[in-house]
Image (spheres, rainbow, N blue to C red):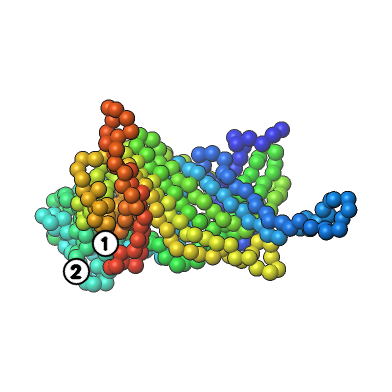
Amino acid sequence: MEATTLNELIRFNLEGTYGETPAAPDMEGLILKNGPALNLAKTSYESQDVGQAERMQSHNIETGRRWTGELVADFTMSLFELFRIQVLRGVLVEASETGSTLSGLMDLDSTTDKIEFSETADFDLFKGAKLLKIENSANAENNNTFRVVSVGSNFLQLEDGALASDDDSTTTAAISISANYIRNGNEDAPGVHIERGFTDIGKYESFIGGILNSLAITIPAETEITMTASYIGQNVITGNASVAGTVTPAAGETPISAATVPGQIYANGVKIADLSSLDFTIGNNLRDKPVIGSSFGLRRGDGYTDITGSLEAYTGDNDLFDNYLAHGDLSLEIPIPGTDGRQAMVYLPRIKQNDNNKGAPSANSDVMQSVSWKAFRPADKDFTVQIDII
């Protein structure tokens, strides 16, 4: 019998100690678009054997090893939530309060769509969020999740109509707000152990010491959103049985269509383009750290967090091209509604266009702008990307 993808299992767990997988770990299943590209690469030395008259080399010794892997999956919120923590390496911020438990007053104003706080401590809990979940309010659209447009001295400005008929009253005490976001940072990412099992032939492979090097998101019109997670790892161990203790099956979420994503490009908060496609990659520029005494070296070294991407925009005006000519800044917000009721927002507060090529591919077609871009840290912020999931 030969192994087939119908009987290929992919599971993972986070390592407590980098490069070490405990006995019988609790593992989670993954559902991928295709079989994962997990490969072990080795370096070796071949002896030169000068003076061998028979013209043959005698020795080949291993000098180093590492594995690389790509997991390609349909976008689901559960999987995106897992990947965002591994790739961004920041501190996860979670906040949830009700009006009755806040230390001060929370004032909802439906006329201005503002949430005002009387206490700095309460305001500080939520002022960094790009998405807020507001439960028990009058407006239940978008699963009670709304975009924060701007932040004032003690208030959050929401998108138009977010608060509907909500106003400061006795009902405010029952209203709860929550936020959940992470930014790129310098925290140590946990090592990842990925197990690949071929159940039809009873063989298993453990890829240990994995670090997420990059995460690529592709959002083309009229099709599904996909994610590609690229890992660099330490070593591979094989066996005739799974090392897993308990296994949590992969969440059976419906993949997300690009048709549900209201991608927006903002210049100074004003929408300036409609998109036909968008893709971006968050990369960590990991590097090998060889060390005497080991063939697979130390934990991978970190580089810059690079965020690059491209987009195709319809040409309704010249605003996007004028921004390119002026070498101006753009902010990019990518809201992604999940099929599990949650919402995500990828927020890039400052991007620069590397190029902007305008043209029509053929007769009877639209004039499109093909743009490549890169994210940079704004002067007033300490991050280049933030991802909210709520």
Quadrant of the snapshot with the N terminus: top right
**How many other residues sit within 10 Å of disc 1, few (<14), some (14-19) or many (≥20)?**
some
Residue 60 appears at what percent x and percent y? Answer: 78, 55
The residue beneath circle 1 is 98
Residue 324 appears at what percent x and percent y? Answer: 27, 52
The residue under label 2 is which amino acid type? Ser
Q: Does residue 340 appear in the picture of this structure?
A: no
Which residue is most to the left?
111
The mark that comes first in sequence, 2 or 1, is 1
Residue lying at 38% horizontally and 42% vertically, measured from the top left: 219
The residue beneath circle 2 is 153
Which residue is most to the right?
53
Task: Give left or right: position of 44 versus 299.
Answer: right
* Element under disc 1: strand
**How many other residues sit within 10 Å of disc 2, few (<14), some (14-19) or many (≥20)?**
few
The residue under label 1 is which amino acid type? Thr
Frontmost residue, 164 versus 372: 372
Frontmost residue, 251 versus 198: 198
Q: How many marks?
A: 2
Residue 17 lies in what quarter of the image? bottom right
Which residue is most to the top?
364
Residue 67 appears at what percent x and percent y? Answer: 62, 53
Q: Is residue 390 above or below residue 292?
A: above
Assess whether mark 1 and mark 2 are in contact (beta carbons under 8 angstroms).
Answer: no
Which of discs 2 and 1 lies nearer the camera? The answer is 2
Frontmost residue, 105 versus 36: 36
